[in-house]
Amino acid sequence: MQLARLSRPFWRGGTFRTWATRCWRRSWVNEARPLGAMSPSAGAGTNLKEVFREKIEPMHKQVVELREKYGEEVLGTCTVSQAYGGMRSVKCMTYETSLLDPEEGIRFRGYSIPECQKLLPKAKPDGAEPLPESLFWLLLTGDVPTDAQVAQLQEDMRERARVPADVLKILDSMPHEQLHPMSQFAAAINLLQRESAMAAAYANGANKSSYWEHCLEDALTLIARLPEVAARIYRNTFHGGKHVPPGQLGDAHDMGKRLARLLGFESPEFDELMRLYLVIHADHEGGNVSAHAVRLVGSALSDPYMAFAAGMNGLAGPLHGLANQEVLRWLVQLRQRLGDRPMTTENLTELCWQTLNEGHVIPGFGHAVLRKTDPRYTAQRQFALKHLPHDDMFQLVSKLYEVVPQVLEAQGKVKNPWPNVDQHSGVLLQYYGLRESQYYTVLFGVSRSLGTLASLVWDRALGLPLERPKSVTTEWIREHFHKQPMKA
Ligand SMILES: CC(C)(COP(=O)(O)OP(=O)(O)OC[C@H]1O[C@@H](n2cnc3c(N)ncnc32)[C@H](O)[C@@H]1OP(=O)(O)O)[C@@H](O)C(=O)NCCC(=O)NCCS
């Protein structure tokens, strides 16, 4: 498989430099993957926990060796501007499940989104998008799973999936109109926490070396329950509390279809959209707000429920996951402001400037790390071209792809004028009838559990310590660099 991937002509997908970087990265990824040493075809079995158990020791050994060899090398530096500027580009943490290249976008365990779409198992008989459980397997173990491995994981998840009745009752009694769906979502995760295996094991004096097992246990249970939690919030908030009983889900065996049906959607195309959605939003390396919050809170040995709830509070910010809600609101407003005028470059340019002059960002454009069009945007665009090429809102999004980067370039501040994942997701959801944009970030949150919790299991397996970077005051900086007395 590696040979097939490397034998593609280098010019497919970029310049010689991109190709060379990619080759270097791949060799790094493969060398760095003790995981590849035990491929599924080598008879690794179908039990995720047992497959993962085998991965820990070689990975741990590798980390020890790297620390012995390169422990004193400088990984990154931090300037005063970076300290004030959100620590952009400061290389100061490790994160195993995914890596983000500014030009090329995300790779899950070394695989790009198109490669994942090609290689990961799909729904039988004719699914085209990867199964979300297969991505979780990949993120956790580094291996592309077999059909049998995914089937067993799905069965395990189904057994864990039912949310306790009293938790549902509390969700039903929340003030749905006043409480944002993300607040309900974070509250629900904290409510589920009382069943944490990690918290119970810690309270019972579990050995440190077993933490990962309890963390994995919690990760699997939480991921399995999130579709029902998310759907409950949706049906309570927007459909008068009329629920689809999980007992009536029939053959909804995978997480994507289960989520779609619980939300109340029946179309196989929407099932596919949910699968794609859950896969592409899952992970975006370790420094983004939600992933880092999960890592940070988990490093205090707060259990996975606590850690994930913290991440979801971060995802709810408009500069992060809430941007998908903001994008649809902005598109609808743009449509209204356009009125009867045609969707021309001139008219859209004028309206984009209006947004900027009102002191707002254009949601769905720009990124803290990416410097090209987000491949997650491209994957959704391809889905739209296949399933809804003539949708009016998709036409608008397509036209904005031509217009907004030019406007942002002309404004002269933005480091990346290209669209990100959030620019496209709402348009797909609204096409199938999920029009309540305040809800969109909950779906993002369900997806993000796959990446951040897989990573959290590795944190405990590797015994990563409490995170505690050093901060300084502005006075400290002034004294340190100007040698001035701090106080008169
Ligand atoms: C994602 C985002 C927060 C990254 O922020 P960042 O790393 O600080 O980005 P930059 O370094 O390019 O920002 C430089 C300037 O351009 C502005 N800028 C960045 N993206 C912009 C956008 N889409 N529209 C208008 N202005 C933007 C920033 O606000 C900043 O302005 P300031 O100097 O007045 O504070 C930013 O691009 C943004 O706000 N995008 C819109 C929200 C969004 O889509 N978020 C989802 C991200 S996946």
Image (spheres, rainbow, N blue to C red):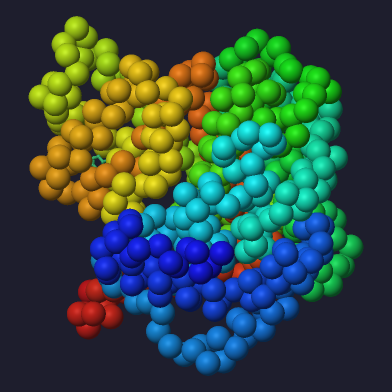
From this viewpoint, which residue is outermost toward the bottom?
69
Q: Measuring from the top left, give residue 414's x and y in whole percent.
A: 21, 48
Name the quadrant containing residue 102: bottom left
Q: Is residue 194 above or below residue 404?
A: below
Q: Measuring from the top left, give residue 100's x and y in whole percent.
A: 42, 59
At 15% from the left and 40% from the top, the residue drawn is 406
Q: Measuring from the top left, give residue 204's x and y in whole percent.
A: 89, 63
Q: Decide which of 264, 215 is in the foreground and name it.
A: 264
Q: Is residue 43 above or below residue 404?
A: below
Q: How many marks?
A: 0
Left or right of 185? Residue 317 is left
Left or right of 107? Residue 345 is left
Q: Measuring from the top left, give residue 352's x and y in whole percent.
A: 19, 29
From this viewpoint, which residue is outermost toward the top?
340
From this viewpoint, which residue is outermost toward the right?
204
Q: Decide which of 370, 317 is in the foreground and name it.
A: 370
At 43% from the left and 44% from the top, the residue drawn is 376
At 37% from the left and 23% from the top, the residue drawn is 389
Quadrant in which the C terminus is drawn: bottom left
Left or right of 245? Residue 181 is left
Q: Is residue 283 above or below residue 68?
A: above
Quadrant in which the N terminus is drawn: bottom right
At 84% from the left and 27% from the top, the residue drawn is 165
Q: Decide which of 201, 46 is in the foreground and name it.
A: 46
Residue 2 showing in the rendered view: yes
Left or right of 116? Residue 22 is left
Q: Is residue 365 above or below residue 308?
A: above
Q: Decide which of 187, 461 is in the foreground and name it.
A: 461
Residue 369 showing in the rendered view: no
Name the quadrant containing residue 465: bottom right
